[in-house]
Image (cartoon, rainbow, N blue to C red):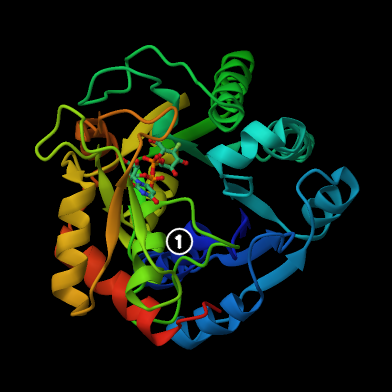
Amino acid sequence: MSLLITGGTGYIGSHTVVELQTLVSEQTPSQDIIIVDDLSNSSTVVLDRVKQITNKTVTFIKADVCDYNAINAIFDQYDIDAVIHFAGHKAVGESNEKPLSYYHNNVSGTVTLLQVMAEHNVKKLVFSSSATVYGDNVSPLNESMPTSATNPYGQTKLMVEHILFDLAKSDSEWSIACLRYFNPIGAHSSGLIGENPNGIPNNLLPYVAQVAVGRLAQLQVFGDDYDTVDGTGVRDYIHVVDLAQGHVKALQNLDKISGCKAINLGTGNGTSVLEIVNTFKEISGQDIPYKIAPRRAGDLATVYANADLANELLGWQATRNLYTMIEDTWRWQSENPQGF
Ligand code: UFG
């Protein structure tokens, strides 16, 4: 039996592959892992690094999930039993500039994958959704709140969620976990894999890390007049290894999920931008120059999870604290200043 991981050379995908190869093989007969990735936002160096960490190899196929023939050929060749679907575009700002590219990749790509899965009678799926689907609900955010989106990226996540709910309703054999991520940060404790954004980072942690390592001059803090502990935005940062372990738990518990279930993966704690900057400064021993800039369009003051459902359904909760998240981010960034 094989497990297909789309987007498996990306940030969250690669950490999940490592956890699958360590945790799963300790507990159950190991499943072969097949990674499919188009390498549009990742590199094959990741595969060497994953092998260095786990001492195991994976099968890698360079393909785009939108390519029906390529995906179909993979399902013809391998005895795939379940899929973890990470592949997709993820930058909010870029999605406003290139909406068609986002709808094509994230929505059409997923529909293509689902068609091939259905045709091969593979009906177990773990999907990368996002807390962005909560729109402007007031935190703590729980899975029964109404959903909405304010940008094309968020719309694609929401559309795919609707597609998955409809699919599960149409055929009770599907078991789907829609994992709604909060803010993944951190890196593997080996320092061998971590987040490696193309160009100037959009997200806070890679930006701060690149300032600390001297690649960028100064952080802009988007707004200091929110109604929060110090006026800066508050988010639920979660260690990427905790998040990866959440995927392993979801996969192991898919049999218990009938239909499609949305599940938050967060810590339930909020941290402000300045708390992040100060902790990063302390851990790295580097200066992190910043200036206060206007609020970023579309940002909310406070976003954090109610993380109870993941605990109830999957027996999962995040265990790594902010200190570990930042320590691991810094180890990765300082040992790989230019990324992979
Ligand atoms: N921030 C700055 N300066 C920066 C970057 C970010 O001050 O250079 C602030 C933001 O204003 C926000 C916080 O840092 O208060 C976190 O911002 P990120 O861009 O790191 O993350 P977001 O919470 O905006 O977005 C993330 C993901 C999205 C996802 C969303 C779900 O990037 O993909 O969480 O809630 F949709």
**Which quadrant of the figure contains the N terminus?**
bottom right
**Which quadrant of the figure contains the C terminus?**
bottom right
* 286 shown above or below 149: below
Secondary structure of the residue carrying tag 1 is helix
* 31 shown above or below 182: below
Could you say which quadrant of the image residue 101 lies in? Answer: top right
Task: Give 317 or 299, whichever is nearer the viewer.
Answer: 299
Whether residue 170 sits left or right of residue 135 in the image: it is: right
Q: Position of residue 326 (x, y in %)?
A: 24, 66
Could you say which quadrant of the image residue 287 lies in? Answer: bottom left
Q: Which residue is mark 1?
A: 16
* 68 shown above or below 279: above
Instruction: Please tell me in which quarter of the rendered image ligand 1 is found.
Output: top left
Q: Residue at x 44, y 65 (%)?
A: 15
Instruction: Kindly identify the amino acid type of the residue bearing the numbered disc 1.
Output: Thr
- Residue 182 visible somewhere in the drawing: yes
- Residue 320 visible somewhere in the drawing: no
Count of numbered tags: 1
Q: Position of residue 198 (x, y in %)?
A: 60, 62
Could you say which quadrant of the image residue 124 lies in? Answer: top right
Q: Position of residue 186 (x, y in %)?
A: 32, 64
* 328 shown above or below 274: below
| Mark 1: few/some/many CA within 10 Å (<14, 14-19, 20+) | many
